[in-house]
Amino acid sequence: MARFDGRAPDQVRPVSFEVGIAPQATGSVLVAMGYTRVICGVMVEEGVPRWMKEQGVTGGWLTAE
């Protein structure tokens, strides 16, 4: 039985990636899968939150929105 878009039950939607979609970001990509579109962007900043410095925590810091 085919899906409404003609794909077989075990067939995934076409996937594509377009890098550099947000020129202000350090890195970015537009991911497309069927009619779904997601923009992923990355910004790199020097430094860590104040609490990490105050507590002597080593390593980096990553956040997501």
Image (spheres, helix red, strand yellow):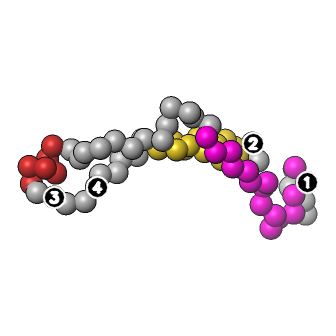
**Residue 28 x, y percent position in the rendering:** 56, 43
Dot 1: within a 10 Å radius of its alpha carbon, few (fewer than 14), some, or many (20 or more) residues?
A: few
Report which quarter residue 47 is drawn in: top left
Q: Are marks 3 and 1 in contact (CB under 8 Å)?
A: no
Dot 4: within a 10 Å radius of its alpha carbon, few (fewer than 14), some, or many (20 or more) residues?
A: few
- Label 4: which secondary element: loop
Q: Which residue is most to the left?
A: 54
The quadrant of the rendering that contains the N terminus is: bottom right
In the displayed structure, does residue 31 sit left or right of residue 52?
right
Residue marked by disc 2: 35
**Residue 59 x, y percent position in the rendering:** 25, 59
- Label 2: which secondary element: loop
Residue marked by disc 3: 57
Report which quarter residue 35 is drawn in: top right
Q: Which of marks 2 and 1 is in front?
A: 2
Residue marked by disc 4: 60
CA distance for labels 4 and 2 = 35 Å
In the displayed structure, does residue 8 sit left or right of residue 27?
right
In the picture, the disc for residue 6 is: 1
Q: Do the residues labelled 3 and 2 touch (CB within 8 Å)?
A: no
Dot 3: within a 10 Å radius of its alpha carbon, few (fewer than 14), some, or many (20 or more) residues?
A: few
Mark 4 or mark 1, earlier in chain: 1
In the displayed structure, does residue 33 sit left or right of residue 10?
left
Identified at 15% across, 43% down, the residue is: 50
Q: Do the residues labelled 2 and 1 touch (CB within 8 Å)?
A: no
Q: Which of marks 3 and 1 is in front?
A: 3
User: Between 45 and 1, which is closer to the camera in this rendering?
Assistant: 45
